[in-house]
Amino acid sequence: MKLGIDQLAKHDFATLRGQRVGLLSHRAAVSTHGRTTAALLHESVNLVALFGPEHGFLGHALAGESTVSFEHPDWHIPVHSLYGATRRPTSDMLEEIDCVVCDLQDLGVRCYTYLATLKNMMSACAEAGIRIIVLDRPIPLPNTVDGPIREPQLDSFVAPAAVPFVTGMTPAESARWMQRYLIPDSILDVVPMEVASRNEVRYDARPHFVCPSPGLRSPEAAMIYPATVFTEAIPSIDCGIGTDHAFTVFGAPWICGEAFCDILDPVAFPGIHFEPAPFISAKEYAGQTLQGVRIVVDDRNAFRPFATAMRLLDMIFRTYGLEQSWEQPSTRPEWFDKLFGAPALREALLAGEPYSTTPPSAYMAERDAILLY
């Protein structure tokens, strides 16, 4: 596999010569040889400004934590925060820039905010007449599309486009989709990866793993994240955030992992299996040992994380009741709707009624039209 940044370097950054270059990126954007895209551009072209997404350009800020702009201590160029005073580049930030390179390690999950940041950068650059170049990277589940389309009234930073929850699109493919369907004035170029087939477009196929955000500490966590991120809205169910098992486990003092595993029908959860997994909570039940459950992916192409999340919640609600899970003061119904993009989904879950998690055929056709691999 050769990443987008590898391909750009292979051609000696020719497309950026003579340009004043801005870069939207972070420390997770590294080449096959482990060099950050920022360092490679600084050495090779006229890099005049940096932009950082959620978690910051340095990648240290926690989820939801605001970051500030600063001057790079060695390169003496501005590092603009796009997760602080503003989440969209201002005209002043773009004033001295001829083109913007974007290299973000995304997950192909609608609520993971790098998609929103890319959309905002594309929109701002389109208004300013600035060319944008998106360097491509793998995602955990390149062949998986799962979940309903976000409803228009729930447009937000965690639901910035009318796409399924798991999009099945790499960063460059997402940019191509947004140019075609949302931002037609975008002056977009993409630099694809060099891969043998789409099956190689996997997050864990790359040689260097760098956490794309502090909570995602392994390739497995990045793959399972869309199945357990619902715990952000239902904190009474702990998914191990703050531990090395974040997003790969779930538990609560009232869940018995071994007994719960026994009632989970494998047929209802293709591509994965469950194991009892005690872990020490670092969040809602800090310091307590929870007799939780670990999700293990056996077949990534069969795994449906959104459908898994909904079936798990249904099983939890039916087995342990709403009183201990949903009907807690910490529950955030509005955030649940924002994350998942359809209030009817929440209503169906709470009523114990079925709800389709199958992406519509119209989206699948749109996606097919912009795929690069």
Image (tube, rainbow, N blue to C red):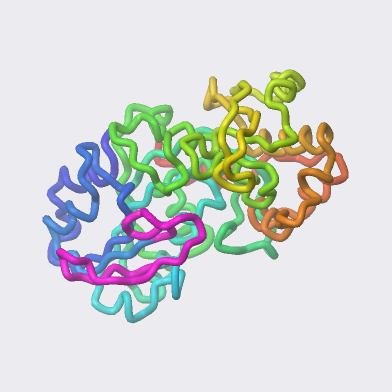
Relative to 53, say whether 320 is above or below.
Answer: above
Q: Quick check: 119 left or right of 281?
A: left
Give the residue at x 64% y 30%.
Answer: 292
Q: Quick check: 330 left or right of 352?
A: left
Which contiguous range is marked in magenta?
53-81
Q: Is 61 a magenta residue?
A: yes
User: Dividing the image into 4 quarters, which one contains the N terminus?
Assistant: top left
Q: Quadrant of residue 205?
A: top left
Residue 193 image position (x, y, % from top left): 31, 39
Give the residue at x 70% y 65%.
Answer: 153
**Residue 141 appearing in the image:** no
**Residue 41 appearing in the image:** yes
Comparing 287 with 144, the one in front is: 287
Q: Quadrant of residue 372?
A: top left
Point out the residue furthest to the front here.
Answer: 287
Give the residue at x 41% y 32%.
Answer: 202
Residue 137 image position (x, y, % from top left): 36, 43
Relative to 284, say whether 290 is above or below.
Answer: above
Give the residue at x 66% y 35%.
Answer: 251
Q: How many marks?
A: 0
Q: Is 239 a magenta residue?
A: no
Relative to 221, say whether 84 is above or below.
Answer: below
Comparing 198 with 47, the one in front is: 47
